[in-house]
Structures are given as C-alpha cells and as structure tokens.
Amino acid sequence: MARAYSDDLRRKLLEAHAAGKGTLRELAERFGVSVPWAWKVSAAHKRSGAMERAAQSRHGRPSRVDRAQVMALLKAKPDLVLCVFESSHILRARIDDYKFYVCHARLLSSGSCDAP
C-alpha cells in the first residue's frame, strides 16, 4: 500500500502556492506529485485551515461488542454456538466480530480455533 506524503511536503506546496510561486499544476510538477493530489491538499487546506494531514483511524470503526460480556458468557458456557449468541440479543454486532471472539475463547481454552 502506498504511503502518505509527509506533512512537510504538504506545507511546502501550500506555502509556495500562497506565495504565488506558481499554479497548483506547476507546483505539482515541481514537487513531483500528481495534480489531483495538489488540488485535494489545497481544498482540504481551504476547508480546515490546517496544512497538516488530518488524523485518520487505521482500524475501521470501533467494535460494538462488549468483550468482557462475551468472554464471561463463553467461560460460563464454552460450547455456545453462534445461533445462541444471535438469539440471546446480548450482542448486536457483525458476524466477523462473533467469530473472532469465539475463536479467541477457544484458543484460550484449548489452544486451537478448530471447532470442538
């Protein structure tokens, strides 16, 4: 996956544009970046006023699963299956979250994610 350009490069491009040292197209060529990237950075700067890149979440949205509740339930009844979780309405999350916690509980108890 490509890495983001540094804040230093963003700042230099924006400062050069503010100083009137060229159009965004000319500056993009001078700094070795794409013209759409220069437009995007300029638009973000106009919106927020910040020259630095906005902080972004790297891990998607936060889980809605209460980990402690799942682990307690699985410790009390380690043979629970997914349909029991779904019907109990204790958890309201994606299927991948369920699978992760069930697998995690099996790893803790037996050292394997395979079905018992």
Image (cartoon, rainbow, N blue to C red):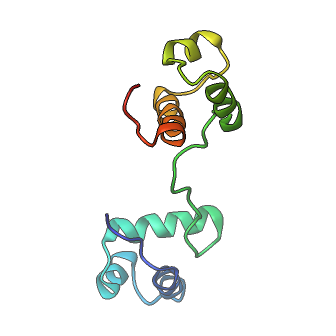
Front-most of 43 and 106? 106
User: Could you tell whether 7 is left or right of 66 in the image?
Assistant: left
Residue sitting farthest toward the front: 110
Residue sitting farthest toward the top: 87
**Residue drawn at x 54%, y 42% as measured from the top left:** 108
**Residue drawn at x 51%, y 31% as measured from the top left:** 102
**Residue drawn at x 55%, y 18% as measured from the top left:** 80
Q: Is residue 65 above or below residue 1?
A: above
Q: Is residue 23 above or below residue 115?
A: below
**Residue drawn at x 65%, y 70% as measured from the top left:** 49
Total labels: the figure holds 0
Q: Is residue 36 above or below residue 64?
A: below
Place of residue 4 in the rendered image (x, y in percent of width and height, measured from the top left): 42, 71
Asked where in the image residue 75 lies, by quadrant, the reply is top right
User: Could you tell whether 28 is left or right of 53 in the image?
Assistant: left
Q: Is residue 44 above or below residue 103?
A: below
Quadrant into which the C terminus falls: top left
Quadrant into which the N terminus falls: bottom left
Place of residue 54 in the rendered image (x, y in percent of width and height, measured from the top left): 58, 65
Asked where in the image residue 63 lies, by quadrant, the reply is top right
Front-most of 70 and 35? 70
Asked where in the image residue 26 lies, by quadrant, the reply is bottom left
Front-most of 91 and 42? 91
Place of residue 25 in the rendered image (x, y in percent of width and height, measured from the top left): 33, 76
